[in-house]
C-alpha cells in the first residue's frame, strides 16, 4: 500500500512530525516511494531486471498522489506502461495485459506495479490528504473508502448488492 502525505512538497516545506509519527505508527516499516524504488531495484537487478530491458507497467489509482511512485520507478527503468486502475485494482483487464506484453523489450522483463494508496493529512488523519490549492483535507483514497462502505453496507444488510447504475461509472 502506498502511503501518501503530499504530492509535491515545496522546497521550503517543513517536515510535519504529526504525519511522520502517524505513518510510523499506522504503517510500521513504511518507506518513501524513492526508497521503495531503490530497494526493489537492488533486489531485481540480481535477477536481470535492468533499466534498458525492463518495462514498468503500472496499475495505480488515477489519484495524483500516485504519480510520485510512478516517477521514482521510471527514473530507474525509463518507460511506464500505464494500465489504468482505481483503488489498487487493475481495470485494464486481459486486453491491457496483452497490450503491455507487446511493449516489453526483446529478452526483457516487466515489473508490474499495482496496489492501493492511503493518505495522511497534516493533522495525522489516516485516509485523508491535503491537496495543493484546496483548504482542509479530503479523502485519499476516496474510491477505496466508497468501495469499503458499499461492501460493509451489503454485508450488514443496509445496502443491496447491485451492478453500477451507470455504465459511465462502472469502475466505482
Image (cartoon, rainbow, N blue to C red):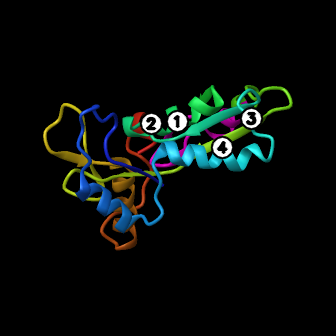
Looking at the image, residue 146 lies above or below residue 7: below
Q: Is residue 50 left or right of residue 96?
A: right
Gap in angstroms between the C-alphas marked 2 and 4: 16 Å
Q: Position of residue 159 (x, y in %)?
A: 33, 64
Whether the magenta-drawn stretch holds residue 86 is answered as yes
> Which labelled disc corresponds to residue 68?
2
Determine if residue 134 is in view.
Answer: yes
Count neighbours of disc 1 (C-alpha within 10 A) and say few if under 14, some if 14 to 19, many if 20 or more.
Answer: some
Of the image marks 4 and 1, the number of the one nearer the N terminus: 4
Of the image marks 2 and 3, the number of the one nearer the N terminus: 3
Determine if residue 82 is in view.
Answer: no
Foreground residue, 88 or 79? Answer: 79
Gap in angstroms between the C-alphas marked 1 and 2: 6 Å
Looking at the image, residue 89 lies above or below residue 25: above
Q: Is residue 44 left or right of residue 159?
A: right
Callout 2–callout 4 Cβ contact below 8 Å: no
Q: Position of residue 9 (x, y in %)?
A: 30, 36
> Which labelled disc corresponds to residue 50?
3
Count neighbours of disc 4 (C-alpha within 10 A) and say few if under 14, some if 14 to 19, many if 20 or more.
Answer: some
**Which quarter of the image is occupied by the C terminus?**
top left
Foreground residue, 87 or 105? Answer: 105
Q: Helix, strand or loop at disc 4?
A: helix
Q: Please tell me which residue is depicted at 72% across the width and 46% down the height of the picture.
A: 44
Q: Please tell me which residue is depicted at 38% across the width and 44% down the height of the picture.
A: 165
Q: Helix, strand or loop at disc 3?
A: loop
Q: Where is residue 104 in the image (x, y as percent from the top left)?
A: 75, 29
Foreground residue, 164 or 64? Answer: 64
Whether the magenta-drawn stretch holds residue 34 is answered as no
**Where is mark 4, residue-wise?**
41
What's the magenta region?
82-98
Q: Helix, strand or loop at disc 2?
A: helix
**Where is mark 1, residue-wise?**
72
Amino acid at each position: 500500500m502506498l502511503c501518501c502525505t503530499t504530492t509535491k512538497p515545496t522546497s521550503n516545506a517543513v517536515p510535519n512530525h504529526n504525519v511522520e509519527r502517524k505513518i510510523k505508527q499506522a504503517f510500521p516499516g513504511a518507506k518513501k516511494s524513492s526508497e521503495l524504488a531503490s530497494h526493489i531495484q537492488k533486489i531485481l537487478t540480481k535477477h536481470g531486471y535492468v533499466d534498458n530491458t525492463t518495462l514498468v507497467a503500472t496499475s495505480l489509482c488515477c489519484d495524483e498522489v500516485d504519480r510520485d511512485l510512478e516517477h521514482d520507478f521510471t527514473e530507474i527503468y525509463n518507460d511506464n506502461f500505464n494500465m489504468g486502475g482505481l483503488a489498487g485494482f487493475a481495470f485494464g483487464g486481459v486486453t491491457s495485459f496483452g497490450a503491455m506484453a507487446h511493449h516489453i523489450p526483446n529478452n526483457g522483463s516487466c515489473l508490474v506495479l499495482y496496489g492501493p494508496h492511503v493518505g495522511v493529512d497534516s493533522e495525522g488523519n489516516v485516509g485523508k490528504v491535503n491537496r495543493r490549492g484546496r483548504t482542509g483535507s479530503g479523502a485519499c483514497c476516496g474510491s477505496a473508502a466508497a468501495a469499503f462502505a458499499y461492501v460493509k453496507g451489503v454485508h450488514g444488510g443496509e445496502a443491496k448488492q447491485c451492478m453500477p447504475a451507470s455504465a459511465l461509472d462502472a469502475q466505482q
